[in-house]
Image (cartoon, rainbow, N blue to C red):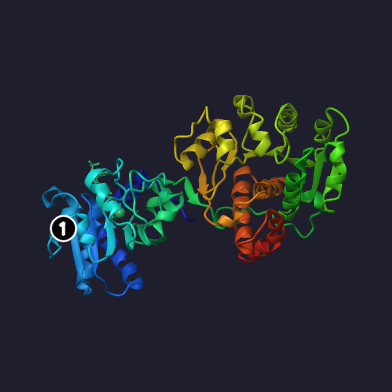
Amino acid sequence: MDELLSVAEMYRADQLAIAAGVPGPALMEAAGAAVVRAVCERWAPHPTAVLCGPGNNGGDGFVIARLLLEAGWPVRLALLGTRSALTGDAAVAADRWPGPIEAADPYILKGNPLVIDALFGAGLSRPLEGHARAIVEAMEGRTVVAVDVPSGLHGDSGRVLGAAPQAALTVTFFRRKPGHVLLPGRTLCGEVVVADIGIPERVLDGIAPQTAVNEPSLWRHRFPWPALDGHKYARGHAVVLGGARMTGAARLASVAALRAGAGLVTIACPPAAFPVYAAGCASVIVDPLEEDGAFARLLQDQRKNAVLIGPGAGRGAQTRAAVMAALDARKACVLDADALTSFADSADELLDRLDKRCVLTPHEGEFARLFGDSVGMDGDKLSRVRAAAARSGAVVVLKGADTAVAAPDGRAVVNINAPPDLATAGTGDVLAGIVLGLLAQGMDGFEAACTAVWLHGEAGRALGPGLISDDLAGALPGVLKALKAQD
Ligand SMILES: NC(=O)C1=CN([C@@H]2O[C@H](COP(=O)(O)OP(=O)(O)OC[C@H]3O[C@@H](n4cnc5c(N)ncnc54)[C@H](OP(=O)(O)O)[C@@H]3O)[C@@H](O)[C@H]2O)[C@@H](O)CC1
Ligand SMILES: [K+]
């Protein structure tokens, strides 16, 4: 599993490693050596400027400078702050640096050296200002290797505090932090290498990380592959509420639910729209809702076990009533788009009714409308999605290029396989449909959401540039086949 450790958890990992008998200076030496290894694998000896900060990130810098010098590289080292202010492991590392210590001024970057950015790492505590900021800004346009994180990037949030350089390579230690995968951090890090510095894996038992990169090892063992003696009803009967006008959305979702493995999919729609839906995918059942209350009656069929409401549903009382009918019927639910926005003025009415079999799939705008009052929009993506899941009791998928998924019990993942080509109309409807198809097959809400987000990203990658949302479901069989081959 690819855990993501918060800054606090990373400090705890260091402490537990030291308590287990790995000396702090050995960790710093290993960290520096790992950076040098990664640098030497990518560049030939090259004039290099190592910029060291006042803490242990700077200590890593002193180790790096010494090892590069020993390897025959032309190295200059500059320190932000004074040598006498260095303490602990960083002071030990500085003692072992045989060369001069220059002041960290932009002039040290003259001649365009390779820059090793060891100014600030996990200990960044406030926005960069003044001198620190000036030296970070002077790195712009140069080849930067970041130690742990690009200085100024916060390891928990992925946000820039003041300024941060664009790195070509970031070498971090033991495990990545959320800031390496959340935007804009992920972009600023460039290539990320995770180095083993001798922290024993078992320290994770004492940390019990709740955050991970979304990858198949988290949920593959629960994927509902059809059984040889199964029949279609064993694979669930999913229902999609179709709207009167924006009919494409429900059609995209229904096909995606089928491709994700649902045994049957029904679109329930206004009678006037029946011809449009019926002319769609032949594998989808279309059921016109002839009279008031017809949707609730349709859901009385116990075999219909999962419901999607939102894509193209229209905003307002009718959609709110449909959501309440699905919740009253105790179905597994996916609520997306208009189903979320319809509760913008009465968020608590919805949030008080949800449970962990409900999956909400908002983008940032929908999230703001539903959770703006309870959770707020100031926190980073991971904190907000976690708070939203805790508030609602539901699984929340906060979409974007760095989609994050949280369960009400505190678990969360960040998804990293989605290509930018997925930023096109209708792809959210497909995602909601995949979640629906997995819920119908009995997957639990959090696992269904994580699986769906990953499958959606892989389908996007398989198609690449030029993809439109109509293509995505058709790419799922190839993605599923490759996933199955990993078993
Ligand atoms: N055993 C270990 O622990 C290992 C740790 N390792 C390495 O240690 C790094 C963490 O080291 P760290 O905790 O010393 O923090 P670090 O990032 O160097 O910064 C702290 C200093 O910066 C200062 N400062 C902060 N923000 C500032 C600002 N905006 N503007 C100006 N100053 C600011 C802050 O000042 P203060 O907030 O105290 O006033 C303090 O002086 C980690 O990223 C990894 O590289 C590896 O060697 C593996 C083993
Ligand atoms: K750094």
Q: Quadrant of ligand 2?
A: bottom left
The image shows residue 258 at horizontal and vertical percentages of 75, 52
Q: Which quarter of the rendered picture does the C terminus lie within? A: bottom right
Q: In the rendered image, is residue 157 in sight?
A: yes
Q: Quadrant of residue 143?
A: bottom left
The image shows residue 155 at horizontal and vertical percentages of 37, 48
Q: Quadrant of residue 470?
A: bottom right
Q: Residue at x 12, y 65 (%)?
A: 98
Q: Residue at x 72, y 35 (%)?
A: 314
Amino acid type of the residue tagged 1 in the rendering: Ala
Structural crowding at the residue carrying mark 1, measured as other residues with C-alpha within 10 Å and reported as few (<14), some (14–19) or many (≥20): many
Judge: label 1 CB < 8 Å from ligand 1. no
Q: Is residue 265 above or below residue 140?
A: above
Question: Quick one: 256 or 145, which is closer to the camera?
Answer: 145
Q: Residue at x 29, y 48 (%)?
A: 15
The image shows residue 386 at horizontal and vertical percentages of 50, 38
Q: In the rendered image, is residue 221 in sight?
A: no
For mark 1, give the secondary structure.
Answer: helix
Question: Quick one: 114 or 59, which is closer to the camera?
Answer: 114
Q: Is residue 200 above or below residue 269?
A: below
Disc 1 marks which residue?
Answer: 94
Question: Quick one: 420 or 387, which is closer to the camera?
Answer: 420
Residue 447 left/right relative to 188: right
